[in-house]
Image (tube, grey):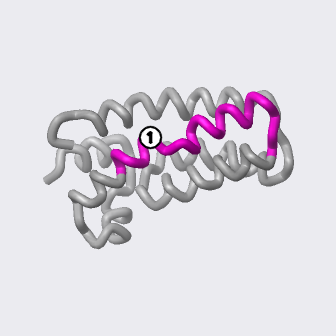
C-alpha cells in the first residue's frame, strides 16, 4: 500500500474513488498528485482574487475544482467549491481571500505529503 494514499485516506480523501479514474494505478496517481501540487492555477487564483478579476479567478478556481475532484481530495474540494460558486455568480468578496488563504494553508500539508520519500 502506498504511504501517500494511506495518508490521504486518513485526511478524509476519497482515494478509492479516485483510483478508479486512474485505472487503479497507484504509481500513476502519485505521479499526478505530485504534478497537481504545483499547478499554476493556485498562484493564478491568488493573483486574480487580489486584483478582483472575477472572470480569471473563476477560470482558475474552476480548473482547481476539477483537478481536486478527479484526485478525490475531498477536504480541498469542499474549500474550492466555496470559492467557485460566488465567482460563478460574478461576486469577488473579501471572504474569498480568506477562503483562498485557508486553501493555501491546507496545501502546505499536501505538499509535504507529495515531497516525502516514497510518496
- What is the quadrant of residue 42 in the picture? top right
The reply, left or right, for residue 51 in relation to residue 80 is right
Crowding at dot 1, Cα within 10 Å, few <14 / some 14-19 / many 20+, comes out as: few
**What residue is rendered at 27% in x and 34% in y?**
115
**What residue is rendered at 68% in x and 43% in y?**
83
Q: Position of residue 47 (x, y in %)?
A: 69, 32
Residue 46 is inside the magenta segment = yes
Looking at the rendering, the stretch of residues picked out in magenta corresponds to: 33-54
Badge count? 1
Q: Main secondary structure of the magenta part?
A: helix
- What is the quadrant of residue 27 in the picture? bottom left
Q: Is residue 16 above or below residue 62?
A: below
Q: In this view, does 5 lie above or below 51?
A: below
Q: Is residue 117 above or below residue 32?
A: above
**What residue is rendered at 56% in x and 47% in y?**
78
The reply, left or right, for residue 72 in relation to residue 83 is left
Q: Where is residue 75 in the image (x, y as percent from the top left)?
A: 48, 44
Residue linked to disc 1:
38
Mark 1 falls on what kind of element? loop
Q: Where is residue 15 in the image (x, y as percent from the top left)?
A: 33, 57
- What is the quadrant of residue 17 in the picture? bottom left
Residue 107 is inside the magenta segment = no
The reply, left or right, for residue 103 in relation to residue 60 is left
What is the quadrant of the C terminus in the image?
A: top left
In the image, 89 versus 48, the foreground residue is: 48
Q: Where is residue 1 in the image (x, y as percent from the top left)?
A: 14, 53
The reply, left or right, for residue 43 in relation to residue 15 is right
Amino acid at each position: 500500500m502506498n504511504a501517500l494514499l494511506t495518508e490521504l485516506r486518513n485526511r478524509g480523501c476519497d482515494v478509492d474513488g479516485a483510483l478508479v479514474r486512474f485505472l487503479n494505478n497507484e504509481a500513476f496517481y502519485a505521479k499526478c498528485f505530485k504534478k497537481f501540487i504545483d499547478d499554476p492555477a493556485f498562484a493564478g487564483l491568488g493573483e486574480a482574487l487580489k486584483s478582483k478579476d472575477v472572470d480569471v479567478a473563476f477560470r482558475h478556481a474552476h480548473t482547481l475544482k476539477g483537478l481536486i475532484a478527479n484526485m478525490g481530495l475531498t477536504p480541498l474540494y469542499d474549500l474550492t467549491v466555496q470559492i467557485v460558486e460566488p465567482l460563478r455568480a460574478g461576486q469577488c468578496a473579501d471572504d474569498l481571500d480568506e477562503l483562498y488563504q485557508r486553501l493555501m494553508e491546507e496545501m502546505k500539508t499536501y505538499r509535504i505529503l507529495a515531497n516525502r520519500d516514497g510518496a
